[in-house]
Every structure is written in structure tokens, then in C-alpha cells.
């Protein structure tokens, strides 16, 4: 995996740089190591390890399914741990240790649907951090064409089916993020 920028529901934005994996010492499992760089408040680098104990088929229906999904699940595990407060960038200055978080089989299961306000907040944070603030203007994730906000298919479906005031929401988002009439 190459470094990737993630945004949480609560508005944290950070770059994840995978640092490899290793056997978990005297435990039955694997530690996946990451360096997380805060992009919101410049709070520096946070070292995190994600521990996966036991065999791979304990987490997914098959080893092939596990191998196919592990990278995405690891990133979502990091994101969820920030949203739950288990992870934070507020650590003593100069801390060099890895904060360990536990991956559970539930991390491989579908997550409960978020309420509309949570989806709205995540979309606003992602649009701001990943497109406006840190986006690549040559390859935007959120694109304005004739002042219409284009989102991923999943987000578009979510907006169309769950937001009765979809157009007003999108117009407000355009105004806040891009000053687009």
C-alpha cells in the first residue's frame, strides 16, 4: 500500500503510511505497522500498530476473502478507532512508541448504517480535506462541472435515497467549499 489520506466522521484528516507487518512476538498473530501524519492541526506523527490475532479464516469466510479485503479493513479500523476516541494525535511530544489497537472479526463485518447527519458530515469533511485543501486539481475526487457536485456512486445513491433536500444540501456544500453560485 502506498500512503493514503483518510478522513473520519469527526473531521480528522491524516495520511497513512504503511510500515510493514511482523509476527506479534510471543502472541499468535500479526502486527501491521503504520505512521499516521496529522493534516488538520499539524500535531505530527502518530505511530500505530494494528494487532490481528489468530488465523485469517477467523476473520472472514475464507482466506481468499480475507486477503482480498485486509488492506481496506485495516484502513477502516484506523478510521473507526479515531471516531471512537481510542486513537488520537494528542500524545506527549516526542513519543516514539507504537500505540496498539486490536482488529476484531467485527471489523470485517458490514458496519451499521450511519444516520443522514453522519453521512452529511463525512461528505463535507471529505470534500474539504481531500479535494479543496489537499486535493490534486488535475485529478479531483469531487469535481465541479457546471457547478454540479459529482460524488462517488455510493454517495450519490445515498444522497438520492436519503436526503429529501438533496439539491439544497448540495448547493449549500458547493457554497461552503467552493464559493460556487
Image: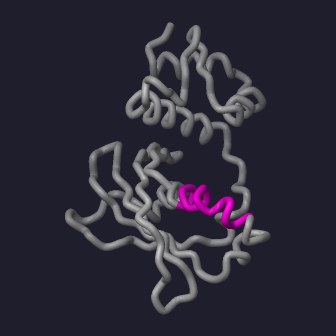
In the figure, is residue 60 to the left or right of 16? right
* Residue 72 magenta: yes
Q: Quadrant of residue 34?
A: bottom left
When the figure is inspected, residue 25 is found, relative to residue 155, above or below; the finding is below
Spot occupied by residue 73 in the image (x, y as percentages of width and height) = 61, 60
**Residue sitting at x 70%, y 29%:** 156
Q: Position of residue 16 (x, y in %)?
A: 43, 54
Q: In the displayed structure, does residue 78 sit left or right of residue 39?
A: right
Q: Residue at x 63, y 83 (%)?
A: 54
Residue at the image point whose x is 48% and y is 45% from the top: 7
The magenta segment is 65-77
The image shows residue 68, relative to residue 104, as above or below, that is above
When the figure is inspected, residue 80 is found, relative to residue 127, above or below; the finding is below
Q: Position of residue 109 (x, y in %)?
A: 72, 62
Residue 60 found in image quarter: bottom right
Magenta stretch, main secondary structure, is helix
Q: Residue furthest left?
A: 94
Asked if the stretch drawn in magenta spans residue 154, the answer is no
Amino acid at each position: 500500500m502506498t500512503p493514503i489520506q483518510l478522513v473520519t466522521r469527526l473531521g480528522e484528516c491524516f495520511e497513512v503510511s504503511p510500515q510493514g507487518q511482523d509476527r506479534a512476538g510471543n502472541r499468535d498473530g500479526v502486527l501491521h505497522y503504520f505512521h499516521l501524519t496529522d493534516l488538520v492541526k499539524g500535531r505530527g506523527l502518530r505511530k500505530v500498530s494494528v494487532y490481528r490475532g489468530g488465523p485469517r479464516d477467523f476473520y472472514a469466510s475464507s482466506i481468499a476473502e480475507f486477503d482480498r479485503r485486509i488492506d481496506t479493513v485495516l484502513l477502516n479500523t484506523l478510521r473507526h478507532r479515531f471516531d471512537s476516541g481510542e486513537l488520537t494525535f494528542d500524545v506527549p511530544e516526542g513519543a516514539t512508541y507504537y500505540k496498539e489497537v486490536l482488529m476484531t472479526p467485527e471489523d470485517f463485518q458490514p458496519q451499521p448504517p450511519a444516520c443522514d447527519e453522519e453521512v452529511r458530515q463525512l461528505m463535507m469533511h471529505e470534500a474539504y480535506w481531500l479535494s479543496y485543501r489537499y486535493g490534486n486539481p488535475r485529478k479531483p475526487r469531487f469535481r465541479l462541472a457546471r457547478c454540479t457536485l459529482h460524488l462517488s456512486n455510493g454517495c450519490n445513491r445515498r444522497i438520492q435515497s436519503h436526503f429529501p433536500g438533496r439539491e439544497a444540501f448540495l448547493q449549500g456544500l458547493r457554497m461552503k467549499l467552493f464559493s460556487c453560485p
